[in-house]
Amino acid sequence: MTDTERDTAEARTTPATPTTKPELSSAGADTAPALVTAGAHEALFASFVEDHGEWENYRTWSDDASVANHESLTLRVQFDHEARDRDIAWTIASYQSPVGERTWHVTATAGTPTDMIETLLKSLDTDTAWIERTSPPLTERTLTTVTRPLTEFGWTPTINGHHISWPAPHGETGLRLDVAAAVGATTARTGPAWTLWGGRSAEQPAWTIEFSRHTPAAVLQDLTYELAITHSTQTQRAPKTPRGHEAIRRRFR
């Protein structure tokens, strides 16, 4: 079992058997990200509902959007058929109970590569996604679990104010953590805690997937793993403690 697999298994809190991930290898360097083609997201939504009997598709009052509810009525996927480019096409939300408060949520734009959307939907087919109602504020353990796939491929973290970023080696995508939002430093902050992005920069992205601060670490790691194997150019694993890691550690002491 690799370090990545071990952290993923520990992040899943239910007694069910966690999803097994393949080992990180040099294969990711030759794996191209799936591009967005016309109707690709539509097809992903349709196949997700068709292939998962525990989900049921509901048409909203408008034909512009469709909603899939989990049989527990605590996890919901909404897809906007009319979204384009940087418009929000996907909204996923988890709730404490069928009538309870929302605990975590994810949004993804219409331009997001299909491999990332497919991975996101697959992550919902795990016990962690809908049984884990709450998760603690950001800890060093959560940080390590989420970012290990990136650091093992040599994505070096950088710190800029309350943001910590892990840009891809070629600089066209990355992960950004808003530490203030992740730890709940201010109740006035409404922005996402974690952002996966692609494009010119995190400030000028072509697409984004944004996660609230209580999103389960295992769900986040599914996405960072996919990002690492499809957007890395390095063929060797990074050292266990990449440059910049000690500065990040100090923020959680």
Image: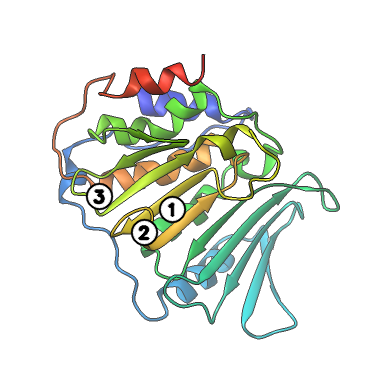
Q: Residue 38 placed where, x, y %?
A: 37, 81
Q: Which residue is mark 3?
A: 231
Q: Which residue is mark 1?
A: 119
Label 2 or label 3, whichever lies nearer to me, is 3
Where, by quadrant of the figure, is residue 236 drawn? top left
- The local secondary structure at tag 3 comes to helix
Please report whichever mark, 2 or 3, sits nearer to the chain's N-terminal start. 2
Identify the amino acid type marked 2.
Asp
- Residue 95 sits above or below residue 84 on the image: above
Q: Is residue 1 visible?
A: no
Of all residues, the one furthest to the front in this rendering is 161
Identify the amino acid type marked 1.
Thr
Q: CA distance from mark 2 to mark 3?
A: 11 Å
Q: Which mark is residue 115?
A: 2
| Residues marked 2 and 1 touching at CB (< 8 Å) | yes
Q: CA distance from mark 1 to mark 3?
A: 14 Å
Identity of the residue drawn at 55% across and 65% down: 90
Q: Is residue 208 visible?
A: yes
